[in-house]
Image (cartoon, rainbow, N blue to C red):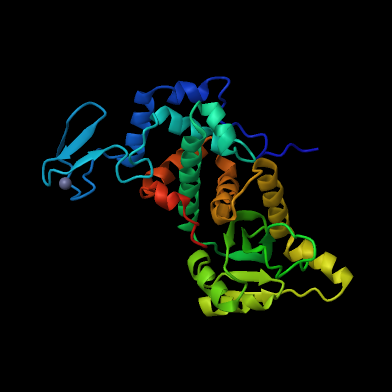
Amino acid sequence: MAKNLIQFQKGLSIHKFKFMRLYGTEEQCYQRLFNIRWPNGYICPNCHSTHHCQLQPRALYQCHSCHQQTSITSGTLLSNTKLPLTVWFLAIYLLTQAKNGVSALELSRHLGISYNASWRLKHKLMQAMKENDDKQPLDYIIQLDDAYWGGRTKGQKRGRGSPKKTPLVAAVALNEDYHPVYMRMSVVKRLEKAEITKWARKHVAPKTLAISDGLSCFDGLVKADIYHEVETKSTAEDLEELQDKYFHWVDTMLSNVKNSLHGTYHALRKKHLPRYLAEFCFRFNHRYRLEKMVSALLRAAVEAPPMPDRLLRLAESRW
Ligand SMILES: [Zn+2]
């Protein structure tokens, strides 16, 4: 059987010390962060002037024009962190290279930090993954399906519409060979037309072709300038053929994400589900670049705004 090239690609091995050789010291991490944030040299985030002085090595930069003082992490997701950069880098490594993710508890053991610190670190990085992927609307052809998160308790309705379940929209963008390129999974308030219109305006490029099974809420796609093709399941034989032809990838992704989240996280709080879904999607969306995924997440963390604890613990916005 042919080797799966994605599964067998070279990552950044920790045991051969490649990762530690690159990012084992504060100085190395600082330099990498600087190059990602200011690839052409320091620029004042306030007035964009490049004239500056450095108050202490690896401390504050002061702008000659507006006198604003800036640290390497201020204004980024790493703002006000008390953790060494080496811990951030190692967390980024562990979150990106493990196929099914790493729980906050496991991360705290690997990093030698408290569970609370590890939880905050992990949720900040998941938030960066979400914000990064959300900037890229899906396009060309997408397979679309609805799904639910959460178990059914005895006596509740099965399937669509059970009251305790959280509704999701799952979308997989395909290339011209009908292979999956990107995926997005979003929690929605309800599976209703108006909600789908809002979701599509944010996550799908206009004129994209979306294929769904015709659940009535997906009629809301048209208002967002999406071409909507409905493939209905009329008989049992049809169902199998249609599933295979039109919904193969979105079905596979949904089943993978459910297995992965159930396997890694024993107590996943529903209010943070969007971040967990985004973490899974980010790894999938960057799967061809395992080695570069560390830099991609680092860049996402630099581009994401600071996330105070108060916001981190609130329920995540739906889309
Ligand atoms: Zn300035």
Q: Nearer the viewer, residue 262 or 38?
A: 262
Q: Is residue 179 above or below residue 122?
A: below
> 312 left or right of 216?
left
Task: Indicate the position of residue 46 as horizontal and vertical percent values.
Answer: 20, 50
> 128 left or right of 229?
left
Task: Indicate the position of residue 218 as horizontal and vertical percent values.
Answer: 63, 75
> Residue farthest to the front?
155
Q: Quadrant of residue 9?
A: top right
Q: Is residue 65 above or below residue 230?
A: above
> 232 left or right of 228?
right
Say which residue appears at 80% left-offset and 65% top-offset: 155
Say which residue appears at 54% left-offset and 62% top-offset: 138
Q: Nearer the viewer, residue 131 or 177?
A: 131
Tally the marks.
0
Task: Indicate the position of residue 33 as horizontal and vertical percent values.
Answer: 36, 35
Say which residue appears at 50% left-offset and 34% top-offset: 91
Residue 92 visible in image: no
Q: Quadrant of residue 135?
A: bottom left
Q: Quadrant of residue 86?
A: top left
> 78 left or right of 217?
left
Task: Indicate the position of residue 116 as horizontal and vertical percent values.
Answer: 49, 37
Q: Nearer the viewer, residue 174 or 160?
A: 160
Quadrant for the N terminus in the image: top right
> Residue farthest to the left?
65
Q: Nearer the viewer, residue 112 or 185?
A: 112
Residue 293 visible in image: yes
